[in-house]
Amino acid sequence: MARVPNPIRSLAEPTAAYIHVPFCRHRCGYCNFTLTAGRDDLIDRYLAAVAHELAGLRAPKDVSTLFFGGGTPSHLPPEQLRRLFTIAAEWFWFAPDGEFSLEANPLDISSERLEVFGEYGVNRLSLGVQSFRAEKLRLLERDHSAEDVRRVVDLVRKRFAGDLSLDLIFGAPGESLDDWRRELDDALTLRPEHISLYGLTFERGTAFWSRLRRGELVAQDEESERAMYLEAVDRLTASGYEHYETSNFARPGKRCRHNETYWAARGYYAAGPGAARYVGGTRETNHRSTTAWLARIEAGQSPVAETETLNAEDRAREALVLGLRRVQDGVDQTAFREEFGYDVGALGGDELTKLVAAGLLEFNERRLRLSREGLLLSDWIWSKFLRC
Protein backbone atom coordinates (compact mmCIF):
# COMPACT_ATOMS: atom_id res chain seq x y z
CA MET A 1 0.00 0.00 0.00
CA ALA A 2 1.51 3.30 -1.11
CA ARG A 3 2.54 5.59 1.72
CA VAL A 4 4.01 9.03 2.13
CA PRO A 5 6.55 9.02 4.99
CA ASN A 6 6.04 10.91 8.24
CA PRO A 7 2.54 12.39 7.87
CA ILE A 8 2.28 14.89 10.74
CA ARG A 9 -0.63 17.26 10.19
CA SER A 10 -3.20 14.82 11.59
CA LEU A 11 -1.17 14.72 14.83
CA ALA A 12 -0.76 18.48 15.20
CA GLU A 13 -1.58 20.33 18.42
CA PRO A 14 -5.39 20.56 18.71
CA THR A 15 -7.13 23.87 18.17
CA ALA A 16 -10.57 22.73 19.39
CA ALA A 17 -11.92 22.05 22.87
CA TYR A 18 -15.10 20.41 24.19
CA ILE A 19 -16.56 20.71 27.71
CA HIS A 20 -19.29 18.27 28.73
CA VAL A 21 -21.95 19.63 31.10
CA PRO A 22 -24.03 16.66 32.29
CA PHE A 23 -26.92 18.41 34.05
CA CYS A 24 -30.53 18.29 32.84
CA ARG A 25 -33.99 18.92 34.28
CA HIS A 26 -34.94 15.36 33.36
CA ARG A 27 -33.83 12.56 31.06
CA CYS A 28 -35.96 12.24 27.92
CA GLY A 29 -36.99 8.69 27.10
CA TYR A 30 -34.87 8.44 23.94
CA CYS A 31 -31.69 9.96 25.41
CA ASN A 32 -28.56 7.87 25.85
CA PHE A 33 -26.14 10.74 26.45
CA THR A 34 -24.03 11.16 29.58
CA LEU A 35 -26.22 13.22 31.88
CA THR A 36 -27.45 13.62 35.44
CA ALA A 37 -31.06 14.70 35.99
CA GLY A 38 -32.35 16.25 39.20
CA ARG A 39 -28.93 16.52 40.84
CA ASP A 40 -28.22 20.23 40.84
CA ASP A 41 -26.58 19.70 44.23
CA LEU A 42 -23.59 18.33 42.29
CA ILE A 43 -23.00 21.43 40.17
CA ASP A 44 -20.48 23.12 42.48
CA ARG A 45 -18.51 19.86 42.82
CA TYR A 46 -18.62 19.53 39.04
CA LEU A 47 -17.19 23.01 38.53
CA ALA A 48 -14.32 22.31 40.92
CA ALA A 49 -13.63 18.99 39.21
CA VAL A 50 -13.58 20.56 35.72
CA ALA A 51 -11.06 23.11 36.99
CA HIS A 52 -8.92 20.30 38.41
CA GLU A 53 -9.13 18.23 35.23
CA LEU A 54 -8.19 21.16 33.00
CA ALA A 55 -5.23 21.95 35.23
CA GLY A 56 -3.79 18.72 33.86
CA LEU A 57 -3.10 20.62 30.62
CA ARG A 58 -0.31 22.37 32.59
CA ALA A 59 -0.39 25.38 30.29
CA PRO A 60 -3.17 27.29 28.47
CA LYS A 61 -3.95 26.15 24.93
CA ASP A 62 -4.77 28.36 21.96
CA VAL A 63 -8.05 27.22 20.37
CA SER A 64 -10.23 28.45 17.55
CA THR A 65 -13.38 26.56 18.57
CA LEU A 66 -15.00 25.87 21.93
CA PHE A 67 -18.09 23.69 22.32
CA PHE A 68 -20.12 23.25 25.51
CA GLY A 69 -22.39 20.22 25.13
CA GLY A 70 -24.43 17.99 27.37
CA GLY A 71 -26.60 17.24 29.04
CA THR A 72 -27.85 20.79 28.94
CA PRO A 73 -25.18 23.48 29.53
CA SER A 74 -27.88 26.18 29.63
CA HIS A 75 -29.40 24.43 32.66
CA LEU A 76 -26.71 25.96 34.89
CA PRO A 77 -27.85 29.13 36.71
CA PRO A 78 -26.19 32.35 35.47
CA GLU A 79 -23.61 32.60 38.26
CA GLN A 80 -22.52 29.00 37.83
CA LEU A 81 -22.34 29.54 34.07
CA ARG A 82 -20.01 32.47 34.72
CA ARG A 83 -17.81 30.25 36.86
CA LEU A 84 -17.70 27.54 34.20
CA PHE A 85 -16.82 30.01 31.44
CA THR A 86 -14.15 31.61 33.64
CA ILE A 87 -12.57 28.21 34.30
CA ALA A 88 -12.56 27.39 30.59
CA ALA A 89 -11.09 30.79 29.69
CA GLU A 90 -8.17 30.16 32.04
CA TRP A 91 -7.06 27.08 30.09
CA PHE A 92 -8.34 27.75 26.56
CA TRP A 93 -7.25 31.00 24.99
CA PHE A 94 -9.95 31.66 22.45
CA ALA A 95 -9.10 33.16 19.06
CA PRO A 96 -10.77 36.54 18.37
CA ASP A 97 -12.40 35.15 15.23
CA GLY A 98 -13.19 31.78 16.84
CA GLU A 99 -16.45 29.89 17.20
CA PHE A 100 -17.89 29.45 20.71
CA SER A 101 -20.91 27.09 20.70
CA LEU A 102 -23.29 26.17 23.48
CA GLU A 103 -26.18 23.69 23.53
CA ALA A 104 -29.38 24.98 25.11
CA ASN A 105 -32.87 23.92 26.07
CA PRO A 106 -35.58 26.38 24.97
CA LEU A 107 -37.04 26.88 28.46
CA ASP A 108 -33.62 27.78 29.87
CA ILE A 109 -33.22 30.81 27.64
CA SER A 110 -33.69 34.10 29.46
CA SER A 111 -32.41 37.63 29.04
CA GLU A 112 -30.06 37.08 31.99
CA ARG A 113 -28.52 33.92 30.52
CA LEU A 114 -28.20 35.54 27.09
CA GLU A 115 -26.35 38.41 28.77
CA VAL A 116 -23.91 35.90 30.29
CA PHE A 117 -23.42 34.23 26.89
CA GLY A 118 -22.58 37.57 25.31
CA GLU A 119 -20.32 38.57 28.18
CA TYR A 120 -18.10 35.51 27.66
CA GLY A 121 -18.12 35.44 23.87
CA VAL A 122 -20.61 32.68 23.05
CA ASN A 123 -21.43 33.29 19.40
CA ARG A 124 -23.29 30.14 18.38
CA LEU A 125 -26.36 28.73 20.14
CA SER A 126 -27.63 25.21 19.41
CA LEU A 127 -31.26 24.96 20.50
CA GLY A 128 -32.75 21.53 21.24
CA VAL A 129 -36.14 22.11 19.61
CA GLN A 130 -36.69 18.50 18.40
CA SER A 131 -40.27 19.20 17.24
CA PHE A 132 -42.98 21.83 16.80
CA ARG A 133 -45.93 19.42 17.20
CA ALA A 134 -47.54 19.15 20.65
CA GLU A 135 -48.25 15.43 20.32
CA LYS A 136 -44.69 14.62 19.24
CA LEU A 137 -43.18 16.82 21.96
CA ARG A 138 -45.20 14.92 24.57
CA LEU A 139 -44.06 11.60 23.11
CA LEU A 140 -40.43 12.72 23.19
CA GLU A 141 -40.94 13.90 26.79
CA ARG A 142 -39.84 17.42 26.00
CA ASP A 143 -40.82 20.20 28.41
CA HIS A 144 -41.50 23.00 25.93
CA SER A 145 -44.13 23.88 23.33
CA ALA A 146 -43.91 25.23 19.80
CA GLU A 147 -45.02 28.60 21.18
CA ASP A 148 -42.11 28.49 23.63
CA VAL A 149 -39.69 27.93 20.76
CA ARG A 150 -41.02 30.88 18.76
CA ARG A 151 -40.90 33.13 21.82
CA VAL A 152 -37.34 32.06 22.63
CA VAL A 153 -36.11 32.49 19.06
CA ASP A 154 -37.58 36.00 19.05
CA LEU A 155 -35.73 36.76 22.30
CA VAL A 156 -32.49 35.29 20.94
CA ARG A 157 -32.72 37.42 17.82
CA LYS A 158 -33.18 40.53 19.94
CA ARG A 159 -30.61 39.84 22.67
CA PHE A 160 -27.99 37.54 21.12
CA ALA A 161 -25.53 38.63 18.43
CA GLY A 162 -24.48 35.14 17.32
CA ASP A 163 -25.80 32.38 15.09
CA LEU A 164 -28.68 30.03 15.87
CA SER A 165 -28.84 26.30 15.15
CA LEU A 166 -31.96 24.16 15.61
CA ASP A 167 -31.95 20.43 16.38
CA LEU A 168 -34.89 18.41 15.01
CA ILE A 169 -35.82 14.72 15.33
CA PHE A 170 -37.66 12.81 12.61
CA GLY A 171 -39.13 9.32 12.44
CA ALA A 172 -41.06 9.37 15.73
CA PRO A 173 -43.69 6.65 16.21
CA GLY A 174 -46.87 7.57 14.35
CA GLU A 175 -45.26 10.48 12.49
CA SER A 176 -46.33 10.85 8.86
CA LEU A 177 -44.43 12.38 5.96
CA ASP A 178 -46.90 15.27 5.93
CA ASP A 179 -46.28 15.82 9.65
CA TRP A 180 -42.57 16.03 8.94
CA ARG A 181 -43.10 18.44 6.06
CA ARG A 182 -44.93 20.78 8.43
CA GLU A 183 -42.04 20.50 10.90
CA LEU A 184 -39.64 21.61 8.19
CA ASP A 185 -41.96 24.50 7.31
CA ASP A 186 -41.98 25.63 10.94
CA ALA A 187 -38.20 25.43 11.19
CA LEU A 188 -37.63 27.36 7.98
CA THR A 189 -40.00 30.09 9.13
CA LEU A 190 -37.55 30.83 11.97
CA ARG A 191 -34.66 31.26 9.51
CA PRO A 192 -31.90 29.65 11.61
CA GLU A 193 -28.35 29.78 10.33
CA HIS A 194 -27.96 26.04 10.89
CA ILE A 195 -30.20 22.96 11.20
CA SER A 196 -29.26 19.50 12.52
CA LEU A 197 -31.56 16.53 11.84
CA TYR A 198 -31.54 13.19 13.64
CA GLY A 199 -33.60 10.09 13.02
CA LEU A 200 -35.10 8.76 16.26
CA THR A 201 -33.18 5.73 17.50
CA PHE A 202 -34.00 3.27 20.25
CA GLU A 203 -30.79 2.83 22.22
CA ARG A 204 -30.36 -0.07 24.61
CA GLY A 205 -30.65 1.15 28.19
CA THR A 206 -33.07 4.00 27.43
CA ALA A 207 -36.72 4.15 28.49
CA PHE A 208 -37.74 4.11 24.82
CA TRP A 209 -35.84 0.84 24.30
CA SER A 210 -37.81 -0.76 27.13
CA ARG A 211 -41.10 0.62 25.82
CA LEU A 212 -40.30 -0.68 22.34
CA ARG A 213 -39.65 -4.18 23.71
CA ARG A 214 -42.94 -4.08 25.64
CA GLY A 215 -44.81 -3.06 22.49
CA GLU A 216 -45.77 0.36 23.86
CA LEU A 217 -43.93 2.10 21.00
CA VAL A 218 -43.71 1.08 17.36
CA ALA A 219 -40.65 2.17 15.39
CA GLN A 220 -41.03 3.76 11.98
CA ASP A 221 -40.49 1.47 9.02
CA GLU A 222 -37.29 1.93 7.04
CA GLU A 223 -38.97 3.29 3.92
CA SER A 224 -40.77 6.02 5.87
CA GLU A 225 -37.52 7.10 7.53
CA ARG A 226 -35.79 7.20 4.14
CA ALA A 227 -38.58 9.33 2.70
CA MET A 228 -38.42 11.78 5.62
CA TYR A 229 -34.67 12.13 5.37
CA LEU A 230 -34.69 12.74 1.62
CA GLU A 231 -37.59 15.17 1.99
CA ALA A 232 -35.45 17.18 4.42
CA VAL A 233 -32.41 17.05 2.14
CA ASP A 234 -34.39 18.31 -0.83
CA ARG A 235 -36.39 20.90 1.05
CA LEU A 236 -33.50 22.42 2.96
CA THR A 237 -31.10 22.55 0.02
CA ALA A 238 -33.84 24.16 -2.10
CA SER A 239 -34.18 26.76 0.68
CA GLY A 240 -30.52 27.77 0.45
CA TYR A 241 -28.89 25.49 3.03
CA GLU A 242 -25.71 23.54 2.30
CA HIS A 243 -26.03 19.85 3.09
CA TYR A 244 -22.45 19.78 4.30
CA GLU A 245 -22.59 16.68 6.56
CA THR A 246 -24.95 13.74 6.65
CA SER A 247 -27.10 15.24 9.44
CA ASN A 248 -26.23 18.93 9.16
CA PHE A 249 -27.34 21.84 7.00
CA ALA A 250 -26.04 25.41 7.07
CA ARG A 251 -26.45 28.74 5.36
CA PRO A 252 -23.33 29.58 3.32
CA GLY A 253 -20.48 30.38 5.70
CA LYS A 254 -22.39 29.12 8.76
CA ARG A 255 -21.14 25.55 9.13
CA CYS A 256 -20.29 24.32 12.63
CA ARG A 257 -16.52 24.77 12.61
CA HIS A 258 -16.05 22.77 15.79
CA ASN A 259 -17.76 19.67 14.41
CA GLU A 260 -15.78 20.02 11.20
CA THR A 261 -12.70 19.38 13.36
CA TYR A 262 -14.11 15.92 14.12
CA TRP A 263 -14.98 15.17 10.49
CA ALA A 264 -11.49 16.24 9.40
CA ALA A 265 -10.05 13.75 11.94
CA ARG A 266 -8.11 16.51 13.71
CA GLY A 267 -7.30 16.55 17.42
CA TYR A 268 -9.37 18.11 20.19
CA TYR A 269 -9.20 18.61 23.96
CA ALA A 270 -12.08 17.67 26.24
CA ALA A 271 -13.15 17.65 29.88
CA GLY A 272 -16.15 16.49 31.88
CA PRO A 273 -17.90 13.16 32.51
CA GLY A 274 -18.06 11.00 29.40
CA ALA A 275 -15.97 13.49 27.42
CA ALA A 276 -13.59 12.11 24.79
CA ARG A 277 -10.36 13.83 23.74
CA TYR A 278 -8.08 13.05 20.81
CA VAL A 279 -4.53 14.30 21.19
CA GLY A 280 -1.41 13.07 19.39
CA GLY A 281 -3.18 10.04 17.93
CA THR A 282 -4.47 8.85 21.31
CA ARG A 283 -8.15 8.89 22.23
CA GLU A 284 -9.15 9.01 25.89
CA THR A 285 -12.73 8.76 27.16
CA ASN A 286 -13.71 9.77 30.68
CA HIS A 287 -16.02 7.77 32.93
CA ARG A 288 -19.63 8.26 31.80
CA SER A 289 -21.03 8.31 35.34
CA THR A 290 -20.97 11.85 36.71
CA THR A 291 -20.57 10.61 40.28
CA ALA A 292 -17.77 8.19 39.34
CA TRP A 293 -15.99 10.94 37.38
CA LEU A 294 -16.32 13.28 40.37
CA ALA A 295 -15.14 10.67 42.87
CA ARG A 296 -12.05 9.82 40.85
CA ILE A 297 -10.99 13.44 40.40
CA GLU A 298 -11.65 14.27 44.05
CA ALA A 299 -9.53 11.26 45.05
CA GLY A 300 -6.66 12.47 42.87
CA GLN A 301 -7.17 9.67 40.33
CA SER A 302 -7.46 9.83 36.56
CA PRO A 303 -11.03 10.23 35.28
CA VAL A 304 -10.16 8.28 32.11
CA ALA A 305 -12.05 5.02 31.59
CA GLU A 306 -10.79 4.05 28.13
CA THR A 307 -7.62 4.76 26.18
CA GLU A 308 -6.84 3.88 22.58
CA THR A 309 -3.77 4.82 20.55
CA LEU A 310 -4.31 4.53 16.82
CA ASN A 311 -1.58 3.42 14.47
CA ALA A 312 -1.07 5.20 11.15
CA GLU A 313 -3.37 2.92 9.15
CA ASP A 314 -6.20 3.04 11.69
CA ARG A 315 -5.94 6.84 11.79
CA ALA A 316 -6.21 6.89 8.02
CA ARG A 317 -9.19 4.53 7.97
CA GLU A 318 -11.02 6.55 10.59
CA ALA A 319 -10.24 9.75 8.67
CA LEU A 320 -11.66 8.17 5.50
CA VAL A 321 -14.95 7.34 7.23
CA LEU A 322 -15.20 10.73 8.93
CA GLY A 323 -14.37 12.49 5.68
CA LEU A 324 -17.17 10.68 3.87
CA ARG A 325 -19.62 12.23 6.31
CA ARG A 326 -18.87 15.55 4.60
CA VAL A 327 -21.47 15.25 1.89
CA GLN A 328 -20.32 18.05 -0.40
CA ASP A 329 -16.58 18.01 0.21
CA GLY A 330 -16.06 14.27 0.57
CA VAL A 331 -12.45 13.10 0.73
CA ASP A 332 -9.91 14.97 -1.41
CA GLN A 333 -7.42 12.35 -2.62
CA THR A 334 -4.38 14.59 -2.73
CA ALA A 335 -5.00 16.24 0.65
CA PHE A 336 -5.74 12.86 2.24
CA ARG A 337 -2.48 11.35 0.97
CA GLU A 338 -0.48 14.34 2.18
CA GLU A 339 -2.08 14.36 5.64
CA PHE A 340 -2.50 10.66 6.44
CA GLY A 341 0.09 8.99 4.25
CA TYR A 342 -2.22 6.61 2.40
CA ASP A 343 -3.77 6.50 -1.04
CA VAL A 344 -7.59 6.51 -0.85
CA GLY A 345 -8.05 3.85 -3.50
CA ALA A 346 -5.44 1.52 -2.01
CA LEU A 347 -6.83 1.99 1.51
CA GLY A 348 -10.41 1.29 0.40
CA GLY A 349 -9.37 -1.69 -1.71
CA ASP A 350 -11.95 -4.09 -3.14
CA GLU A 351 -14.70 -2.79 -0.85
CA LEU A 352 -14.35 0.69 -2.32
CA THR A 353 -14.47 -0.72 -5.86
CA LYS A 354 -17.67 -2.64 -5.05
CA LEU A 355 -19.34 0.36 -3.44
CA VAL A 356 -18.53 2.57 -6.43
CA ALA A 357 -19.86 -0.10 -8.82
CA ALA A 358 -23.06 -0.32 -6.74
CA GLY A 359 -23.58 3.43 -7.09
CA LEU A 360 -23.18 4.12 -3.37
CA LEU A 361 -19.94 6.10 -3.72
CA GLU A 362 -18.78 8.56 -6.36
CA PHE A 363 -15.05 8.36 -7.05
CA ASN A 364 -13.01 10.37 -9.51
CA GLU A 365 -9.38 11.35 -9.76
CA ARG A 366 -9.90 14.19 -7.31
CA ARG A 367 -12.30 13.09 -4.55
CA LEU A 368 -14.45 10.33 -3.04
CA ARG A 369 -17.91 11.03 -1.66
CA LEU A 370 -21.30 9.48 -0.94
CA SER A 371 -23.92 9.31 -3.67
CA ARG A 372 -27.54 10.14 -2.88
CA GLU A 373 -28.27 6.44 -2.44
CA GLY A 374 -25.12 6.07 -0.35
CA LEU A 375 -26.45 8.68 2.08
CA LEU A 376 -29.21 6.25 3.01
CA LEU A 377 -26.77 3.42 3.74
CA SER A 378 -23.94 5.43 5.25
CA ASP A 379 -23.73 3.53 8.57
CA TRP A 380 -23.34 0.27 6.66
CA ILE A 381 -20.73 1.83 4.34
CA TRP A 382 -18.59 3.00 7.29
CA SER A 383 -18.27 -0.60 8.49
CA LYS A 384 -16.63 -1.59 5.21
CA PHE A 385 -13.61 0.65 5.85
CA LEU A 386 -13.00 0.25 9.58
CA ARG A 387 -11.00 -2.65 10.99
CA CYS A 388 -12.70 -4.40 13.91
Image (tube, rainbow, N blue to C red):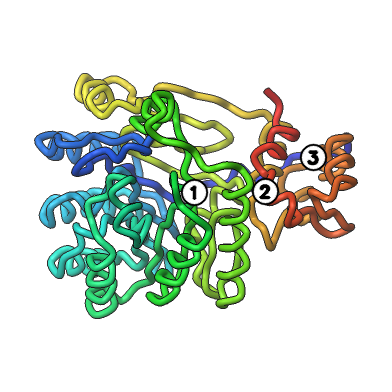
Say which element carries label 2.
Answer: loop
Q: Amino acid at mark 2?
A: Leu
Residue 153 placement (x, y as % from top left): 29, 71
Q: Which mark is residue 307?
A: none
Q: Residues within 10 Å of mark 3 (few under 14, many from 20)?
A: few
Of pointers 2 and 1, the one earlier in the residue sequence: 1
Q: Amino acid at mark 3?
A: Pro
Residue 268 placement (x, y as % from top left): 48, 45
Q: Residue at x 56, y 77 (%)?
A: 239
Inter-mark Cα distance, 2 to 1: 14 Å
Q: Which mark is residue 376?
A: 2
Residue occupied by mark 3? 5
Numbered disc in front, either 3 or 1: 1
Q: Is residue 328 above or below residue 333?
A: below
Numbered disc in front, either 2 or 1: 1
Q: Are marks 3 and 1 in contact (CB under 8 Å)?
A: no
Residue 57 placement (x, y as % from top left): 36, 39
Say which element carries label 1.
Answer: loop
Of pointers 2 and 3, the one earlier in the residue sequence: 3
Of pointers 3 and 1, the one earlier in the residue sequence: 3
Q: Residue at x 44, y 44 (%)?
A: 173
- Tell which of 94 and 31 is nearer to you: 31
Q: Are marks 2 and 3 in contact (CB under 8 Å)?
A: no
Residue 223 placement (x, y as % from top left): 63, 47
Image quarter hosting the N terminus: top right
Inter-mark Cα distance, 2 to 3: 36 Å
Residue occupied by mark 1? 171
Q: Amino acid at mark 1?
A: Gly
Q: Is residue 114 above or below residue 26?
A: below
